[in-house]
Image (spheres, rainbow, N blue to C red):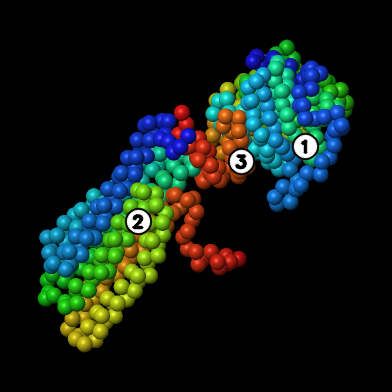
Amino acid sequence: MGPQIHTDKVYEAELARLRERLLEMGGKVEAGMVAAVRALTERDSALAERVKEQDREVNRMEVEIDEMCRRLLALRQPAASDLRFITTALKIVVDLERMGDLAVNVAERALQLNQSPPVKPIHDLGPLAELSYGQLEKALDAFVERDVHKAEEVIQGDDVLDALYLKVFNELLTYMMEDSRVVRRATNVMFAAKQLERFGDHAINVAEMVVYMVRGTDVRHPHSREVPPIT
Amino acid sequence: MSPAYEAAMNMEPAPENRLFADAGPDRPAGTATGAPRAAGGVEPKLRVRDLNAWYGSNHALRHVSLTVPPRSVMAAIGPSGCGKSTFLRCLNRMHELVPGARAEGTLLIDGQDLLGRDVDPVSLRRRVGMVFQRPNPFPTMSIRDNVAAGLKLNRIGGNHDEIVERTLKQAALWDEVKDRLGASALSLSGGQQQRLCIARALAVEPEVLLMDEPASALDPIATAKIEDLIHELKERYTIVIVTHNMQQAARVSDQTAFFYMGELVEVGPTERIFTNPGEQRTEDYVTGKFG
């Protein structure tokens, strides 16, 4: 008796459908952020508008996936790995929806920036952006493949992401100190960079839930657990 | 098996054939074996060690070892034919009543061996009571006489009316029957009959209560009453329940034991078994991936 499918094939199909919809949503969120950054770097306002438009679909999917999870909990009384999968879905859908909003924020900065001349160091967003959506992509892969090792790589990637964000932050700060006329534009870029850093943070939340889903151990907030609760 | 037959099996003296073969003649009944303490320092109420059971040549239960802490509920789950009911019936030596059946192993209650050859199965069943799948009150007896039946059989003295009232209260049935104790037990609903059978089992003050699918013949409300009752009873008794209903096991038990093909696959805290079991076969069963 190895890993098997559910005896109830309808249940099996419902779980598979939930998994598919989550992945679709994750794919849309990733594509949204990629497009938002492109709208910024390539000064493409039409693309930025499309990012805003497509986020509505992400929002709709959040509601739909929540409903699927509630239905499964109520009608199937899932246990063990099924229960962990569904509770994981309920948690990561919140992160994914928020990540969609972050892409919209970047798109809105792009619309602002596209109205004035380009800021010079904008290309420096590249490595931060690549790592940021790379984190989500890897977290989603870990989710599909039930790969704890991959999820842990995502969690460990946070330090690199923070370092890249700090680098962009410092560059922009220096730039603003040199020329006060770019403060407004550079602040917009800085804001976009912050959205990318947060995007990566949400990818870590997703990865942490993947570890829980696969192993049943909660790896969130390791440092908080060392502190005794306040009585 | 008819309800009357099951009731009779529960109450009547067992045949003399002694089937627990490993209880040798040099092992007197009720010998304390100095069993080590369970984790957490609580001495287990029930300790089962290397229990095996057969129906003829069919080895139905294989090398089962586990412990049940006092005043707790253990649920035995598993697919049909997995051995969970056989396990339950070994615990009060009802298994040996089946023609051709035998069992071997060690069963200790409070460290006392109950499978010694001098142990009278009837007095064992006074310590280890049983409730069956279908309510099986004695059909010709009144409600009062049903509860008192075990007292009479075991020649237990005292004020039977007081005992009847106390146990009917413990079984959460008193308020519903106090004005008609002389009525036939069959005038009660299925759920009330089952609680009557629980009261009958409790009247002789057992230490361990075995329940074999006690709510499977009942509607959801009657089931909820039985489950609520189990929560109350575990304040005083150690309970082992066999159930096909996994949600029921999850709701009522502290520990869950998963049986498959005669083996105890896994036993552990119920929450862990239903959220993160250690064995793949348990995982497959609780998520519905069998067959």
Query: Which residue is found at the position 58% from the left and 37% from the top?
Result: B265
Q: Is the residue A12 above or below the residue B155 in the image?
A: below
The quadrant in which residue A164 appears is: bottom left
Q: Quadrant of the C terminus of chain A?
A: bottom right
Q: Position of residue B254 (x, y in %)?
A: 63, 42
Where disc 2 sits, the SS reads: helix
The residue beneath circle 3 is B267
Do marks 2 and 1 share a subunit? no
Using the image, tell me which numbered label, if any, was put on residue A49: none
Q: Report if residue A121 is visible in the image.
A: yes
In depth, the one of B48 and A231 nearer the eye is B48
> Disc 1: which chain?
B
> Disc 2: which chain?
A
Using the image, tell me which numbered label, if any, was put on residue A139: 2
Q: Position of residue B263 (x, y in %)?
A: 60, 33
- Sequence-first tag of 3 and 1: 1
Do marks 3 and 1 share a subunit? yes
Do marks 3 and 2 share a subunit? no
Say which amino acid is labelled 2: Ala
